[in-house]
Structure formats: C-alpha cells, structure tokens
Image (cartoon, helix red, strand yellow):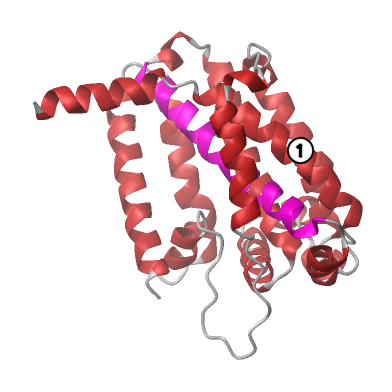
Amino acid sequence: MAERLRSRARGLFVNTRWGSYGMVALYLSLFSGVIVALQYDPGHPYYSVSSLDILAPFGLFWRSLHFYASQAFFLLTLAHFLAMVIRREHESIAFKRWLLLIFSLVALLLILFTGYVLRADATGASAGMIAENILLSTPLVGRPLNWLLFDLTQEGVKRVYANHLVGLGLLWLVLSWDHLRHYRISWRQSPTLVLLLVAFPALVAAPLEPERLGAFHIGGPWFFVGLQELLRHLPPFWAGIVWPGLLVCALALLRRPALASRARLFCLAWLAIYALLTAVGLSR
C-alpha cells in the first residue's frame, strides 16, 4: 500500500506540467514587474519601494504580485528541472544544451537574488553586502565579476537594477531559449494557478523589512539562508563559490552515464546538507 502511494505521488509529480505552469507565473511576474519598475528609483531604492506601497494606485498589490509570481516561477522551474531528471529526459539532451540549462538556473537564481537586493531593506542590504564580499574574495575574476554584477560600494543599486531589468534576463533567455521555444501556454489551461497567484498577493503583502540598528543577525532570502549559515564556518570563497560550484558540476555529470549514479547521490547529499544548514539558519 505504501509503495503504491509513493508510486502515485511520484507519477503525479512527474506528469504535472511544471514548465507550462512556470511560464504562467513568469508572465505575471513580467507584467507586474513593468508596473513596479515605472515607480522604482535606483537612486533612492528603499524610499521608492516603501512609497510605492502608499502613493501608487494598488502599489502594494503590484509589488506583492511581482514578488510572489517571481518566487513561484523559480520554484516551478526547479520542479520542472527535477521532473526532467526523474524522467531521465536529460539523457536525450546534448551535453552542451544540458550545460546551458544548468547555467540558466544559475542566471534565474541571480535574477531572483537581485530582486531582493533592489528592495534595499534590511534583508536586501545584508544579502547584497554578503554577495559582494564573496565575489571580492574570489581570486583573479572576483573584482571584474563584482563590477559586472553588483558594484554596490561604488554604484549603489544602479548596476544591480540594470542587470535585474535587462542583463540577467537576456542571459537567462539566451541560455534557455532552445528549450523555452517548445512551450505554448494558454491562460485558460491554468485558471486555478492564475487565481491563486492573483489572490494570494491581495491577501498577503510582500515582505519589506526596515533597517534594524544594532541587530546581531539578519536573515537573507530563503534560498540564501543555508549559504549564509555556511559562511559562519568557512571562508567566503569556499562557502560562496566552491560549495555551490560543486552542485553545478554534479548536475553537469548527470549527463555522463559512467558517473551519473555517483553524481545523483552527490546532488542528494548536497541538498540534504544545504537543507540542514537552512534549518539551522532559520532557527537563529
């Protein structure tokens, strides 16, 4: 009986149209993001975000819709990627295309992360400072990468704003286009998801945490908490570059038949360790 339930649950996960659902969330994120961007001032980021909630018509709703739709798109994309691995679809994908899909996930994570930084609240400011220090600790390429992606010390959030709006989005589109162009979606096929993504922001406001003077610990974005906890025990380069890089390498090796089983076990172990680190970080 238990085995039958597990089989049904696995089948439900594998057969769900995660990719199509993710595209619905993406369109809602883009639509609401345009409205939020029209009110955003990178010269005064926190003030413009907080004033959006008060002064713009339905400003809090549009900001919350953009926040939750973006989170949903990221999670649904991860589910789609995992379903591909479970169905072993990656085995029929050329190794080069598989690498592009992996790096498209990295680009998508950076887009989501820069959205937190642009809020410039306690969470965003802390996350941006940590990310900049991680890049600056990287030998040889650290400073050029920081100049390209963040440069918060010199430019404030202006560089981050440009990357969030254009640079990283174009990079993600280029990396995932060959896979993305096969999807056709219809709003009428996902009425429940659309209703949920519109109703939830109307009921639950997106977070905006003011600066807390003298705070000993400020938690980062939920996907960043495990890395933040790891930074307590390892130098920035090892925690912020090498540790995530190991997962990227293991995902790439899933496409190599001789190493696929070991790579799969390593990915599971990595995720378990990161989940534990996240739990510890959230408990602080």
- Left or right of 32 in this view: 229: left
Q: Mark 1 points at which residue?
A: 30
Residue 79 is situated, as x and y percent measured from the top left of the image, at 46, 32
Query: In the rendered structure, which segment of residues is drawn in magenta?
Result: 58-87
Q: In which quarter of the image is residue 83?
A: top left
Residue sitting nearer the eye, 103 or 144: 103
- As drawn, the residue found furthest toward the bottom would be 214
**In percent of the image, x 32 and y 31: which residue is there?**
264
Q: Residue furthest left?
A: 1
Q: What residue type is labelled 1?
A: Leu
Question: Does the image show residue 234?
Answer: no
Q: In this view, does 246 lie above or below 15?
A: below
Is residue 218 found left or right of 247 in the rendered image? right
| Left or right, 187 with reference to 19 | right
> Can I make out residue 12 in this image?
yes
Q: Which of 174 and 82 is in front in this view?
A: 82
Magenta portion: prevailing SS class: helix
Looking at the image, which residue is at 56% across and 86% down? 215
